Image (cartoon, rainbow, N blue to C red):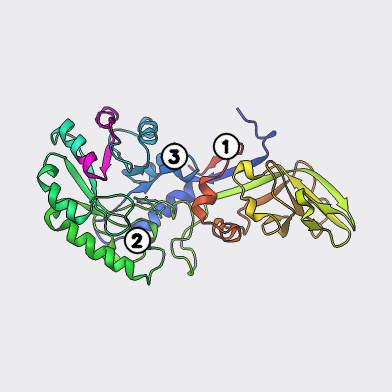
Amino acid sequence: MLSQAAAGAILTIDLEALAENWRALRACLKQGAEAAAVVKADGYGLGAEQVASALTKAGCRTFFVARLEEGIRLRKALSKGERIFVLDGVLPGTASEFPAHGLIPVLNEPGQIKEWAALTQGQARAALHADTGMNRLGISQAELERLRPRLEKAGLCLVMSHLACSEEADNPKNAEQLGRFLEARKNLSHLPASLSNSSGIFLGSDYHFDLVRPGVALYGVNPTPGQPNPMRQIVELKARIVQVRDVDLPETVGYGATHQVLGKSRIATVAVGYADGWPRSLSNRGFGALAGVRVPLVGRVSMDLMTFDVTKTPGDAARPGGFITLLGDGASVDEVADLAGTIGYEILTNLGPRYFRKYVGG
Ligand SMILES: Cc1ncc(COP(=O)(O)O)c(C=O)c1O
């Protein structure tokens, strides 16, 4: 067990802020619509069991994971009453695992429907994924017509689809997919329906149907890019300072000597690197916070370490054993992702196993 004193970084996850985000999303929904929670990829890197347990306390009853294994693990943390959908659905040879573990597969393609219907004969629940133009997973409209007789034996309890461009409110693809979803539902109108992820919720009540599937917004990433973030950040990441050194011209810092000091400087080296999921693309671009001062990441991010120019921080704020904040204290997941040339999803899901994890507010 990793001790806090020996950890290179401390990742704090605020489960009360998470629950507040879930309640805030639920409050946006049209009357009668349910808010589920997407907790795949280990709860977007933040711990699926902890996240789902906290959301259950807040009232969430439906969860989505990607992989069968994720579902099996999560099932153990939840009570029988909570539904767990598995987005990958029935990979060949796995159908019997779903009823055995109390999981609901999302049927994505004709072979999955065939295997599921043959095994369960309508005696176990499944969701149907209709493709509405993303062309990633899901049954096309033409296939849907052809498969209709078989669907009766699939035990369907939900029809769903997924939006490709929901974070761009003006993108015409949203309305196009909505239209195709309404078409797909025509002969399935007896089934509850689900279309929206986090950003889809903000496209308005036409997109809410019976169930929404937010993921990233629960974890504090902005579902309305370009507008103020309506969600609370739920993570704080503090990197341990291992060494502080004074340097002066003509020294350089780090691999490749990519940072040339401009004069008398103090450099703090912290115990986080790209092996911890901190993007190497933040080399000479990132920043941290120390004693209320933004400190630039100078030089390259290496495997286990990176370096900050702490010249402007007061007194002994930078000292071995102290911390530089990488997320929190004004550093949002979205800003870090932008600087790294990626998205908040990737920053969160890459948060490393070497961090000491603390859950608060649950
Ligand atoms: C099918 C499906 N539904 C919902 C979500 C949640 O999306 P978001 O994290 O953007 O809310 C995802 C995530 O990728 C998904 O694949």
List the residue tagged with mark 3.
Answer: 48
Q: Locate residue 272: give its quadrant.
A: top right
Nearer to the camera, 190 or 289: 190
Q: Tag 3: Cα neighbours inside 10 Å, few (<14), some, or many (≥20)? A: many
The image position of residue 55, as x and y in percent, is 39, 44
Task: Identify the magenta region.
Answer: 92-113
Instruction: Name the residue tied to disc 1.
Output: 353
Which numbered disc, 1 or 2, marks the residue that appears first in the sequence? 2
Residue 81, by quadrant, is: top left
Residue at 78% in and 57% down: 259
- Is the CB atom of the residue marked by disc 2 within 8 angstroms of ligand 1's nearest atom? no
Q: Which amino acid does label 3 sit on?
A: Ala
Vertical side of 147 occupied by 335: above or below: below
Q: Does ligand 1 reach within 8 Å of label 1's beta carbon? A: no
Give yes or no for contact between labels 3 and 1 (Cβ–Cβ under 8 Å): no
Extreme residue in the left direction: 149
Magenta-drawn stretch contains 110? yes
How many C-alpha atoms fall within 10 Å of the one at disc 2: few (<14), some, or many (≥20)?
many
160 shown above or below 107 = below
Q: Is mark 1 on a helix, strand or loop?
A: loop
Counting from the top left corner in percent of width and height, residue 297 is at: 72, 55
Q: Which amino acid does label 2 sit on?
A: Ile
- The residue under the point 38% across, 34% down is 74
Badge number at residue 201: 2
Q: Which residue is drawn at 24% across and 52% down?
A: 130
Which SS class for mark 3? helix
- Lateral position of residue 79 relative to residue 303, left or right: left
